[in-house]
Image: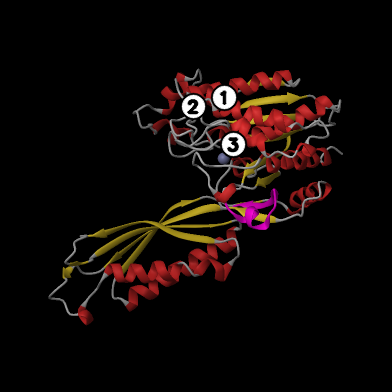
Amino acid sequence: MKKDTLHLRGRLLEKYDNKLDKNGISGKRLAERLDALSRIGRTESNGSDRPGFSHEEKAAKELIMQWMKEAGLTARMDGAGNVFGRLAGKNGDAPAILSGSHVDSVPNGGHFDGPLGVLAALEVAESWKETVYQPEKPFEVVIFTDEEGSRFQEGLSGSEAMMGKADLEAKKKRQDANGLFFEEVLQDVGLSLDSYVSAKRNLNEIDSFVEVHIEQGKRLEKEGLSCGIVTGIAGPHWLKFTFEGQAGHAGNTPMDDRQDALVAASEFIFTLNTIPRQVNESAVATVGKLFVEPNGVNVIPGKVTLYVDVRDIQEETRKEVVARILRLSEELSQKHSVQVQYEDLLITPPVPISEERQDQMKKALEANNIRPYSLPSGAGHDSQVVGSELPVAMLFVQSKDGISHNPAEWSSLDDCVQAVHVLKSYVESLQS
Ligand SMILES: [Zn+2]
């Protein structure tokens, strides 16, 4: 028998401040549900393994659909596997406010990335049931399928299907690690390519989307805050650079007669690191992958191929960072007598969150006596897909030590419940 060493429920409730249980919101219910989900696809090291379109992801969704029904919501799964738990509004014809996240995980991931956002939205519906409150606008608790993309290395499949933004031709060609095509993986969980396409919704039915998510960084922890306002979701711009010099004998080539591609690339990486902060506070740039050729101890490097990941929440500033990186590569090409070439591999538009929505979130924080603090999202989320056409907002919850995509991922129950209170205030503020 597998030893139950996780005790997520117990660990969460151990330090919980019961005074946060008010207005129909229950920390115990939230802890129990986080615990129940953590048991689906649990790994040997107490992590979470629920890839998109897996039986584990489906089981997690089915369990939540049961809770949705108990909370008085009408639950349905669409052709992409997205789940919508709908609460009728007093004004039945009004577009619905959607809130939720995802329940799939990366391999051996944590128990908060995704599930917290879904359960926070469900907890808002639970609180209304307990306090006998019916919102003016319909409210839908959403579970988006395959956010992480651990199956096909792309993700956001569910939100893209709902928005009608999926590139089906590209998806059809993808194979997972077991050689299964997208279509076969869909069939395995009772879906099909046709049903996937049918998941596109009429966007007039949707007022806006709000997502609670763990921060996956350390900013809120440093500020001592339970949650904070997301200013935008940074889109990545990936570039591939090749530095080509001259391979040569490390012993017989004098220092002033070299075209060392790695020396040029090293200065490039070192200087590139200083560029984002010269342009914008939220901009970042990273070289995370590099190949040296011929890669011999006694050979002057003749060629270096490296990859740059640039992100920011505004397109203009991200463009400026990229422009400065390109200028740097030209300068270093001259300085070190090497050829530099580059190509764009991926350009995903950043999604800024409107001032208006950020301001409403600020008021929701203040209503709960939490100092408003704003921060960008460096990682991608379903909100970026939905936010390309509809108003979105995001609320980040403090992550312990910034750890995520790891079994050690943790957020205190106090912080999680505070976020539910803020989400509730925010959604209620959108009713008029
Ligand atoms: Zn996530």
Place residue 246 in its image quadrant. bottom left
391 vs 376, left or right, is right
Mark 3 sits near ligand 1, with its Cβ under 8 Å away = yes
Q: Secondary structure at mark 3?
A: loop
Specify whether residue 209 is painted magenta: no
Dot 2 or dot 1: first in sequence order is 2
In this view of the protein, which residue sits in the foreground, 373 or 378?
Answer: 373
Q: Is residue 66 left or right of residue 181?
A: right
Residue 60's mark? Answer: 1
Which residue position is annotated with label 2? 41
Mark sitting earlier along the chain (2/3): 2
Res. 199 visible in picture: no
Write down the residue under mark 3: 114
Q: Quadrant of residue 174?
A: top left
Residue contact between numbered discs 2 and 1, judged by CB atoms under 8 Å = yes
**Disc 2 residue type?**
Gly
Identity of the residue drawn at 52% across and 35% down: 166
Q: For the magenta stretch, what is the residue range?
A: 217-233
Badge 2 element: loop
Foreground tag (2 vs 3)? 2
Instruction: Specify whether 283 is left or right of 54.
Output: right
Tell me the distance, in whole angstroms, between the alpha carbons under discs 2 and 1.
9 Å
